[in-house]
C-alpha cells in the first residue's frame, strides 16, 4: 500500500489516514508513506506522538513494515530517532529521503 501526503497535513489528517488503513485491514501489510510533498512543519514532539500512534496499531494484529519518505534532512533525523527507540523486529519502520531506496527496502520486507 502506498499513501501520499501533499500540501498542508494536520495531525487529524494523519490520524484519519491511519484509522482508514485500520478499517480496511491494511495494517497487516507493507506500507509506504510518501510525505515529500507535505508542506506542514512537524515538530519532533508531534512526530514522536505520530510514531507512537502508528505503533499502537500493532495491537490489532501482525503489523506490516512501514517505510516513510520525507523531504528534509531534519525531518528524517527527527523521525528516525523516534523510530529507533524501542522498534520491535516484528514491525520494522524506517525513514528515508530517497523514494527508490524506500521502495527497495519495503519490497524486501515480508508481507
Image: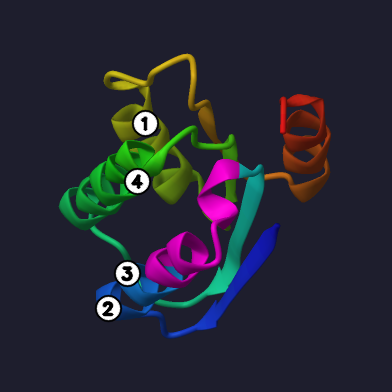
- Mark found first going from the N terminus, 2 or 1: 2
Q: Residues within 10 Å of mark 4 (few under 14, many from 20)?
A: some
Q: Secondary structure at mark 2?
A: helix
Q: Earlier in the sequence, mark 3 or mark 1?
A: 3
Region rendered in magenta? 18-28
Going 72% across and 25% down the picture, which residue do you hit? Answer: 110
How far is mark 3 from mark 4, CA to CA?
Answer: 11 Å
- Magenta segment main secondary structure: helix
Secondary structure beneath disc 1? helix
Q: Quadrant of the N terminus?
A: bottom right
Give the number of the mark in front: 2 or 1: 2
Of labels 4 and 2, earlier in sequence is 2
Disc 4: which residue: 57
Q: List x then y, in percent, for residue 104.
A: 83, 33
Question: In the rendering, at what x and y percent does residue 102 appear?
Answer: 72, 40
Question: Which numbered disc flags the more N-terminal residue, 3 or 4?
Answer: 3
Taking the image as shown, residue 45 lies to the left or right of residue 82, namely: left
Assess whether mark 1 and mark 4 are in contact (beta carbons under 8 angstroms). Answer: no
Q: Which mark is residue 15?
A: 3
Question: Where does label 2 land, which residue?
Answer: 12
Of all residues, the one furthest to the bottom in this rendering is 8
Q: Position of residue 63 (x, y in %)?
A: 50, 36
| Mark before the other along the chain sequence, 4 or 1 | 4
Residue pushed farthest top?
89
In the image, farthest residue toward the left = 45
Q: As rendered, which of 50 and 73 lies closer to the eye?
A: 50
Q: Is residue 40 left or right of residue 12?
A: right
Amino acid at each position: 500500500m502506498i499513501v501520499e501526503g501533499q500540501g498542508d497535513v494536520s495531525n487529524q489528517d494523519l490520524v484519519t489516514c491511519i484509522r482508514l488503513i485500520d478499517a480496511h485491514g491494511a495494517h497487516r501489510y507493507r506500507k509506504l508513506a510518501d510525505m515529500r510533498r507535505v508542506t506542514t512543519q512537524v515538530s519532533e514532539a508531534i512526530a514522536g506522538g505520530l510514531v507512537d500512534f502508528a505503533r499502537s496499531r500493532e495491537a490489532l494484529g501482525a503489523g506490516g513494515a512501514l517505510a516513510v519518505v520525507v523531504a528534509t534532512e531534519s525531518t528524517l533525523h527527527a523521525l528516525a530517532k523516534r523510530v529507533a527507540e524501542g522498534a520491535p523486529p516484528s514491525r520494522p519502520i524506517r525513514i528515508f529521503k530517497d523514494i527508490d531506496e524506500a521502495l527497495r527496502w519495503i519490497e524486501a520486507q515480508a508481507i
